[in-house]
Image (tube, helix red, strand yellow):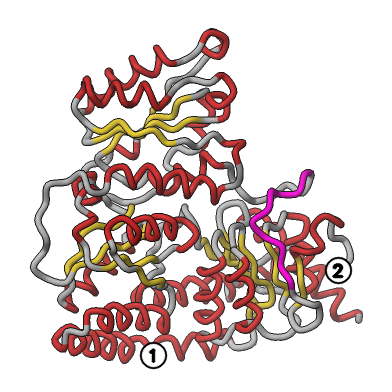
Amino acid sequence: MQGILKERVKQVFKNGTDHFDMSCDTPSTSGSVSQRACVFCGSRVVLYPIADAVHLVHGPIGCASYTWDIRGALSSGPELHRYSFSTDLKEKEVIFGGEKKLEESIVYLAKRFKPKAVFVYSTCIIGIIGDDVERVCKQATENIGIQIIPVHSEGFKGTKKDGYKAACSAIFRLIGTGKGTKPKKPSINILGEFNLAGESWIIKNYYKQMGVHIQSVMTGDSRIEAISNAHLADLNVVQCSGSMLSLAKMMEEKYNIPYTHVSYFGIEDTAAALYEVAKHFGNPEIIKNTKELVTKEISQLTAILNEYKIKLQGKKAAVYVGGAFKAFSLVKALARIGMEVVIAGSQTGNKDDYNQLPNMCRPGTIIVDDSNPLELSRFVQERDADLFVGGVKERPLAMKLGLGFCDHNHERKIPLAGFEGMKNFAQEIYISVMSPVWKFHEFRQKKQIGGQND
């Protein structure tokens, strides 16, 4: 494909035309202005929603400032996660070490806020100066009497996905430390659901209607006590494979808890997720409740979606999100309302994800890994997209090019999961794509004039 950096030719393909062999799980190409984040940021987005813990960033103030409120995750109770604490290392600590300042910070925060636990995030500078964060946290745990958990998330160690693994390792230290008892009902942990706009409350309500007990959600609206007793669950349900699959595997190995991989985006995937859990337990009452729930929700939603489909039929969408598994659901959800996905990509997809994606997309769809703004803008123009589904970094790109935009990442305020989320998704897409404002957009006007001249 013309205009692609030669180092990236193995990460951009046109479906049905090129020999597909995606190169992924690699460092971003230098100079490409990747949309990815660092290891520290990856760990922060996973752990941040734990609402009754202190999250202390050990490093310069900029790291804490950059990731403050990074998910905007909602809590039904405590909101310690909404604070952004930092040891605020200066030149003196960089030269002579920051362990003493870290110790003082932990003691002060534990006394001042009385958290259930403290997560201490190591940033790039800590990896360089060599502070023994592990030792400091172990000593503080003994002295204070609560869990002080190091998160080995030095930013330069890899990609955002490595940050996910660091977060999972930190969570795993907590699991099994609780003193709870085995639930009487069949129970699950929901992994990779972060309650950005209340989604975990929607999903938990579904399982309540089914007769399934939620042991813990990791990590949306989560509590330290629930996580510490997560080993008591019968099944792990993994919503975001990129961020939490490693934790599910660790729990399977140590606690013999099986896991299943699901998605709660779109009608088909939400129904499949609920049926998958019901099937796992094999309880006739749970299966009956699940069928009734799914039937009721789909019957209420079908007429609404069909109305949107009539109006959106033939419109084209570009999808570029964090994980490729989310892209699968979005391709299906957009098809359900009459839209064709012409660009599909992710920041952190793996080989297995990308091997499945071409089968879900039409010929000519551009499939891309770890893209950058220059590439994305060229693809959007080439494929004549009407909508961009992405995150906060893609929003300015969409607005400059005169496209409708749907935020499907950390910062959104409208729940998009479950049956209720599908209704919200369709409504937001319709409002954005069909807005009359685009006829006044300079780029779209030029495009229309050019098309008429052709």
Where does the image place residue 67, in percent across and percent down from the top left? Answer: 48, 38
Quarter holding the C terminus? bottom right
**Label 1 environment density (alpha carbons within 10 Å; few <14, some 14–19, many ≥20):** few
Residue type of the residue flagged with mark 1: Thr
> What SS does tag 1 mark?
helix
Task: Report the front residue among 170 and 69.
Answer: 170
Separation (CA) of disc 1 from disc 2: 40 Å
> What SS does tag 2 mark?
loop
Q: Which residues are magenta?
A: 21-30
Q: Which residue is identified by label 1?
A: 302
User: Which residue is outermost to the right?
Assistant: 454
Q: Residue at x 39, y 55 (%)?
A: 247
Q: Is residue 140 visible?
A: yes
| Sooner in the amino-acid sequence: mark 1 or mark 2 | 2
Answer whether residue 29 is magenta in the image.
yes
Q: Is residue 158 above or below residue 6?
A: above
Q: Is residue 102 above or below residue 416?
A: above
